[in-house]
Image (tube, rainbow, N blue to C red):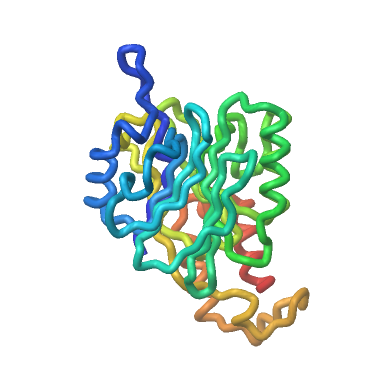
Amino acid sequence: MKVPFKTLYRYNDFSGESARSLTNKLNKFQSYVYSKAYDIVCITETWLNEMINDNEILPENYTIYRNDRGTRGGGVLIAVNSNIPSKLITRHINTEMITIELDLSPKLQISCLYIPPNCSVEYQQFLLRTIHTLPTQDDVILLGDFNAPDANWSTFSANSAFSTSLCDALLSQNFMQMVSQPTHKKGNTLDLILTNAPFRLGNICVVRRERFLQSDHYPVTADLYSTSTSQSHLNTKPNEPAQLNYADLPKLSLHLSLCIESDAYITSLLATHQCLGMILRM
């Protein structure tokens, strides 16, 4: 399954007019998505409103899930190929975030999130509480524009108070950050893919040669594996230490090879520790 995880929209301004809106780029957007034949598209800063219908965004072959800001700017969207069974889980209130579920084996939750720069303390608190409500027993992918240039995602540490709290919240959910290259033209890694199931992702790529629709963010793409090994598929009991003498070593090798496809896995000792821990604790 070919999947782009992309925080697509932060456009440059031209002639004093904002060019960040998806609404005035629909033709180019549709041409791009259909030409790439992506299965899933995730977007932040859509600038959509109730006047724009879902079938105007991608007229054919996609199920649209969106959480519009309701005022000028912002907004998030996930488009899923209609051949992939999916459903809405939560259109989060007070947070620019939407969560869906893919009916794969096992099921997979995907959340798309936008954190506005210089957001209010109230928004920050809502966001942190929302992150803590994400399921820890299910496979989860959380992605989007986190706007935390001061964060070091290999160590989950940061300089500012909010970014530090954000790192702590994500680490408490046993998330691993998979994007290891800058995603913004200024050299910052703002667009992230976080997951508690790293073996379900591979071939993560920041497409630096392609600034999508004049955005100052680069597209991020990844392959999504439709199957993985979860607790229900193994014989070990919950909280029981793994008995490596009886382990399915070929399957373990497969999971390790999938993890190693990610640059973040190779470059981060923390990521390595988390990935191994997830596999051995299953």
Residue at (52% x, 29% y) in the render: 71
Q: Position of residue 181 (x, y in %)?
A: 45, 40
Image quadrant in which the C terminus is located: bottom right
Exactly how many numbered labels are in the figure?
Answer: 0
Residue at (39% x, 51% y) in the render: 41
State the residue in front, 159 or 16. 16
Residue lying farthest to the front in this orientation: 51
Q: In this image, 252 relative to 172: left or right? A: left
Q: In this image, 28 relative to 99: left or right? A: left
Q: Is residue 182 visible?
A: no
Residue lying farthest to the right in this orientation: 239
Q: Position of residue 87 (x, y in %)?
A: 50, 63
State the residue in front, 195 or 14. 14
Image quadrant in which the N terminus is located: bottom left
Q: Is residue 138 visible?
A: yes
Residue at (38% x, 21% y) in the render: 18
Q: Position of residue 49 (x, y in %)?
A: 44, 36
Query: Quarter of the image holding residue 14?
Result: top left
Q: In this image, 10 relative to 139: left or right? A: left
State the residue in front, 146 or 130. 130
Q: Position of residue 73 (x, y in %)?
A: 48, 29
Residue at (56% x, 45% y) in the render: 97
